[in-house]
Amino acid sequence: MYKKIILISFLMVCLMSTAIARTPSTDNASVYIISPSHGEMVVNPVTVRFGLKGMGVAPAGTDKAKTGHHHLLIDTKLKSMDDAIPKDKKHMHFGGGQTETTLKLSPGRHTLQLMLGDMKHVPHNSPVMSQQITIFVE
Ligand SMILES: [Cu+2]
């Protein structure tokens, strides 16, 4: 019984320490998609421009307060704010500090959302993310 309580306490401390480890964002931080705009009809290749206020852009791995790098979520939403952002076709990382990208998307409806991540690709506390916008590709 005691062993169980100790184990559960230990696991809770582990969970709390990962939450504490998240990098703080600034109160006035906001990230937004400059273009395209919500509801816009676009043609390939689609250039997406990233906007950031209240914090700075720094390449991945840079240990500097109030900075992060952009992530573009395509047709998906982030499931966890406590883990590193996945790296795949739907979760693009701009670890070089890029502030725009050019995509080739299949014709039809797509969603885009920007998410700032810290030097280890983990969302800040509180998370800095844009509205999810919908675009239509011809
Ligand atoms: Cu990243």
Image (cartoon, grey):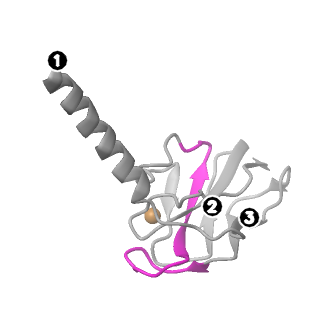
Q: Does label 2 or label 3 sit earlier along the sequence?
A: 3
Report which residue position mark 1 lands on.
1
Instruction: Say what secondary structure mark 3 lies in.
Output: strand
Report which residue position mark 3 lands on.
33
Q: Residue at x 45, y 72 (%)?
A: 95
Q: Residue at x 37, y 75 (%)?
A: 61
- Residue 54 visible in the snapshot: yes
Q: Does label 2 or label 1 sit earlier along the sequence?
A: 1
Instruction: Please provide percent x and percent y for residue 19.
Output: 42, 51
In magenta, the rendered stretch is 56-78
58 magenta-colored: yes
Q: Please give the count of numbered marks on the rendered protein.
A: 3
Tell me if residue 8 comes above or below residue 26 in the rendering.
above
Classify the position of ligand 1 by quadrant: top left, top right, bottom left or bottom right: bottom left
Tell me if residue 91 comes above or below residue 23 in the rendering.
above
Residue 128 got which mark? Answer: 2
Q: Amino acid at mark 3?
A: Ile
